[in-house]
Amino acid sequence: MRVVSGEFKGRVLKAVPGTSTRPTTDKVKESLFNMIGPYFSGGIGLDLFAGSGGLGIEALSRGLEKVIFVDREGKAIHVINENLKSCGLEEKAEVYRNDAVRALKAIQKRDLKFDYIFLDPPYKKQQLVKLLELIDKEGLVHQDGLIVCEHASEITLPAQVGGLVQSRNEKYGIIGITLYKVEAEDEGEV
């Protein structure tokens, strides 16, 4: 597993030991960032099921100015911190050990809004719709921001969740990527 592009291209990242996390493959990561970027001029991201931190670190390498990493596993938090340190990105990151729902509620209290939110929960415990509902309800994504959902390819997510509308869906073998954006304020009006 490595950083695919940007300032830290080629940097090898450590994986979380064991089978509790499933890192996004380099091929899928490259396709995903080509869909949403591929490069950024600033902005803030949230890597909610961060695992090794690969998606958030890739986003920082491609130009995001800050990423908040959240995972509930202690081993994952340790690996995220190691990977951030090896890239010299500690100053551009916040790392928290927390459950996803509690983390979103804590973020809402800080009045933060994100340009990019990466959701890659364990496939066996899909909770994407619940998380999307919470993100929408709390207004955690900018009007022109994107939410990136990684899931098993056989999962079909709804076309709309509250004020979030699906803008793209792609399949890469067993992996599916679905993008959501905030519904434009003039959509739906005649």
Image: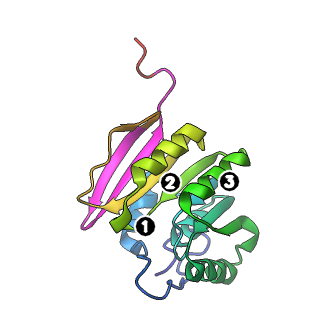
Q: Residue at x 71, y 78 (%)?
A: 88
Tell me how many marks there are: 3
- Is residue 152 a member of the stretch shown in magenta? no
At label 3, the amino acid type is Ala
Q: Name the residue under label 1.
A: 29
List x then y, in percent, for residue 143. 57, 36
Lower position in the chain sequence, tag 1 or tag 3: 1
Asked if the residue at tag 2 contacts the one at tag 3, i.e. Cβ–Cβ closer than 8 Å, the answer is no
Q: Is residue 96 above or below residue 87?
A: above
Assign the C terminus to one quadrant of the image: top left
How would you rate the neighbour count of disc 3 (Cα within 10 Å): few for under 14, some for 14-19, many for 20 or more?
A: few
Q: Residue at x 47, y 43 (%)?
A: 133
Q: Along the horizontal axis of the image, is 110 left or right of 37?
A: right
Residue 180 sits in quarter: top left
Could you give the CA–CA distance between mark 3 and mark 2, rounded to whole angstroms?
28 Å
Q: Residues within 10 Å of mark 1 (few under 14, many from 20)?
A: some
Label 1 and label 3: CA atoms lie apart by 28 Å
Comes first in the chain, label 3 or label 2: 2
Disc 1 marks a residue whose amino acid type is Lys
- The residue located at (51%, 74%) in the rendering is 51
Colour style of the rendered protein structure: rainbow
Looking at the picture, does residue 14 appear above or below residue 146?
below
Start-end of magenta stretch: 165-186
Q: Which of 83 and 158 is in front in this view?
A: 158
Residue underneath mark 2:
37
Q: Give the SS element for disc 1.
A: helix
**Which residue corresponds to mark 3?**
106
Q: Name the residue type under label 2.
A: Gly
